[in-house]
Image (cartoon, rainbow, N blue to C red):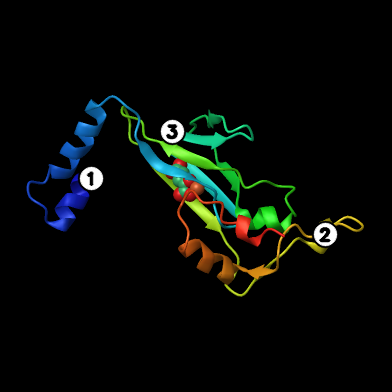
């Protein structure tokens, strides 16, 4: 935050960190990153070992992902859910800010090419099994995503 303020030429330099301190003083856990699913095929995440990442179970209960700086968190995205015709689930997740330690994460998002058609892999479809989704390209999905909010179920509009 200090470096950002410095880069922005904001004076006094500690204006932004004062804001963070004020939030921490409230003693409540703020939203670090709102609930959402990742759009791409796969996300590979590493963090600095600070807790905060949570996934939603099917019953809506939020469960914390253990914070381990030596572990990778591999997450299925919406596109892989479609490619597997729903066998792999794009799990809803969020980050709850920790008032004691900052969470830093780096994520690799593996996404398809813009013109790529996103559809269940034929070899995964059983006899007579239909795609659960309408035909769409990654570009079409992205366009729909730009018109949605972070927490929206963006795949819903592509369901058959
Ligand atoms: O920072 C994190 O741990 C997760 C962030 C995230 O879910 C995302 O960028 O898609
Ligand atoms: Fe995410």
Q: Indicate the quadrant where residue 63 lies.
A: top right
Q: Is residue 35 visible?
A: yes
- Residue at 11% over, 53% down: 10
Q: Residues within 10 Å of mark 2 (few under 14, many from 20)?
A: few
**In the image, what residue occupies the spot 66% across and 55% down?**
80
Q: Which percent across, then down, holds residue 53?
A: 47, 36
Ligand 1 contact, mark 1 (Cβ < 8 Å): no
Residue that mark 3 sits on: 52
As helix, strand or loop, the secondary structure at mark 1 comes to loop
**Does the beta carbon at disc 3 come under 8 Å from ligand 1?**
yes
Mark 1–mark 3 distance (CA, rounded to whole Å): 19 Å
Tell me the distance, in whole angstroms, between the alpha carbons under discs 3 and 2: 38 Å
User: Looking at the image, is mark 1 or mark 3 nearer the viewer?
Assistant: 3
Q: Which quadrant: the N terminus?
A: top left
The residue that disc 1 covers is 1
Question: 10 Å neighbourhood of mark 3: few (<14), some, or many (≥20)?
Answer: many
Asked if disc 1 and disc 3 are in contact, CB closer than 8 Å, the reply is no
Identify the element where label 2 is drawn.
loop
In the picture shown, does residue 60 fall above or below 110? above
Identify the mark nearer the N-term, 2 or 1: 1
């Amino acid at each position: 935050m200090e470096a950002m303020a410095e880069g922005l030429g904001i004076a006094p330099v500690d204006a932004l960190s004062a804001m963070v301190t004020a939030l921490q003083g409230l003693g409540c856990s703020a939203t670090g990153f709102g609930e959402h699913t990742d759009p791409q095929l796969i996300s590979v995440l590493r963090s600095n070992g600070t807790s905060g990442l949570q996934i939603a179970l099917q019953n809506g209960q939020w469960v914390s992902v253990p914070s381990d700086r030596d572990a990778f968190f591999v997450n299925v995205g919406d596109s892989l859910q479609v490619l597997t015709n729903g066998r792999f689930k794009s799990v809803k997740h969020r980050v709850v800010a920790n008032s004691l330690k900052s969470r830093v994460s780096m994520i690799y998002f593996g996404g398809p090419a813009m013109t790529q058609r996103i559809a269940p892999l034929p070899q995964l479809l059983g006899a007579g099994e239909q795609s659960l989704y309408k035909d769409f390209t990654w570009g079409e999905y992205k366009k729909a995503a730009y018109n949605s909010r972070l927490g929206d179920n963006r795949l819903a509009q592509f369901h058959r």
